[in-house]
Image (cartoon, rainbow, N blue to C red):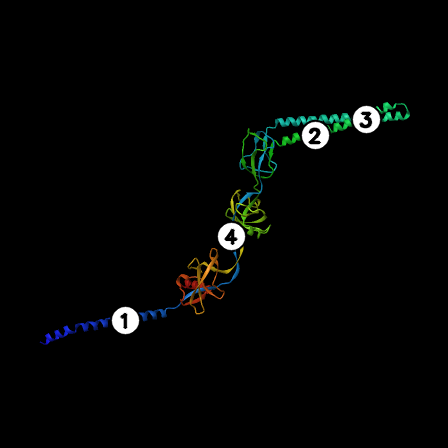
Amino acid sequence: MHALEIRRHLGRKWWRYALLLGWVVVLQFLALACATRVHADQSTNAAPAMTVPFFQIKAQNSFSSARRYAGTLVAARAADLGFKRGGEVEAIHVDLGDAVVAGDVLARLDDRMLRAEEQRAAADLVLARANLVATQADAQLAANTERRTRSLREKGHVSKQSYDETQLSLRAQLAQVDVAKANVRRAGATLEAARVALAEAQIVAPFSGRIQARYVDEGSQLASGRPLLKLVEDSEMEVHVGLPAATAQNLSIGQSYAVMIQDRIQYLPLRTVLPEVDPATRTVKAVFQLDTSKSRAVAYAVGSVVELEYDELVSSDGFWVPLTALTAADRGLWSVFVVNDDNLIERRLLEVIHTEAERVFVRGTLSEADRVVQTGVQRIVPGQSVIPVPAMQAGLASNKARGEG
């Protein structure tokens, strides 16, 4: 009976025990959660603050931008050489790439006819000179006759008619002398023209250089003025660089500038800046002088692309910061982290003005009093408490730690 009564009593009160058991489980869960949170807070408070290196920025009103402008290596002098007179090419003494010296004979026309004309002109000159000598002798005889006749006339032994005839004969002989002298000069000019024509039957190098092109071969019939060879000067070259007009105004004539030629930096003097703007490129041409005689070991190729390296001063307010200090922000902006007076991290938005290899020139919400985090920006967030250390000291500490390790 007693056992039966106990079962009946439990059947009527089971829901009370179930509710009590549920409350016990809930209380134990809450207690466990509070203990876990307290332990986490204690662990957080116990962890030391992160050390971050910082640097002080300096405001500037301008920056130097290293820029490169492409140009071309050209010969100081280049000429297409041809004959002034037409004819058949008899000989060409040079070929492609040959080095020549000023005054060298490069090619020659068939000049047999010209030599014949020279000989005839020389003979005409000899004849004219001989005629002049004969005419001068006749004039001398006429002068002597006139003098004797005048003496006899004064004594009354010669008529006036005879004396007049003697005078007129002298005048005619003197005129013949003038004609003979003119014939000598004309014959001399003809001979000189024949010699010039003979000289023009060959091509002489006007300056030292190398043969760039050969357009025809021996036996070709050339018209007057048609080019036969192209000669390019290789002792002196020029570098032509197109520059914006504003940049070209900052260059000084005679000053040397760094030019990259065939992977080598050379400092070349600026010879001139042309006044006209190229309508195609909207640039002006700066001409630099390259003296290749000082570096014969280097073979310079005409037409090679070169680069002028020029540090241009740009007026703009801002700061230089290393690339390691930048983090991306919204709407195309960038940001840096700074450590405030409470040693908490704050974010500053920036606009990048100019980029170089390891640093950028920026402007934004920065001041010279800010301590900008230099490296490790991916490990910190705004509001985080840190221990700021000057970047130089942080680097020394890091090196010391690696040495001890």
Closer to us: 205 or 278: 278
Residue 92: name its quadrant.
top right
Dot 2: element: helix
Which badge, 3 or 4, comes first in the chain's sequence? 4
Q: Which mark is residue 188?
A: 2
Q: Secondary structure at mark 4?
A: strand
* Quarter of the image where the C terminus is located: bottom left
Rounded to the nearest angstrom, the CA distance separating label 2 from label 4 is 65 Å
Discs 1/2, front:
1
User: Which comes sooner in the sequence, label 2 or label 3?
Assistant: 3
Residue 191, given in percent of the width and then of the height, sits at 68, 29
Residue 403 in which image quadrant: bottom left
Indicate the secondary structure of the residue bearing disc 1. helix
Q: Is residue 248 above or below residue 326?
A: above
In the picture, measured across the screen, residue 357 lies left or right of residue 227, that is left
Q: Position of residue 260 (x, y in %)?
A: 52, 48
Q: Earlier in the sequence, mark 2 or mark 4?
A: 4
- For the point 87% across and 26% down, the residue is 150
Dot 4 corresponds to which residue?
Answer: 67
Is 362 placed left or right of 81 in the picture? Answer: left
Disc number for residue 30: 1
Q: Nearer the viewer, residue 130 or 360?
A: 360
Q: Amino acid at mark 2?
A: Gly
> Between 269 and 226, which is closer to the camera in this rendering?
226
Category of crowding for the residue at label 1, using alpha-carbon neighbours closer than 10 angstroms: few (below 14), some (14–19), many (at least 20): few
**CA distance separating discs 1 and 3:** 155 Å
| Residue indicated by mark 3 | 170
For badge 3, the amino acid type reads Leu
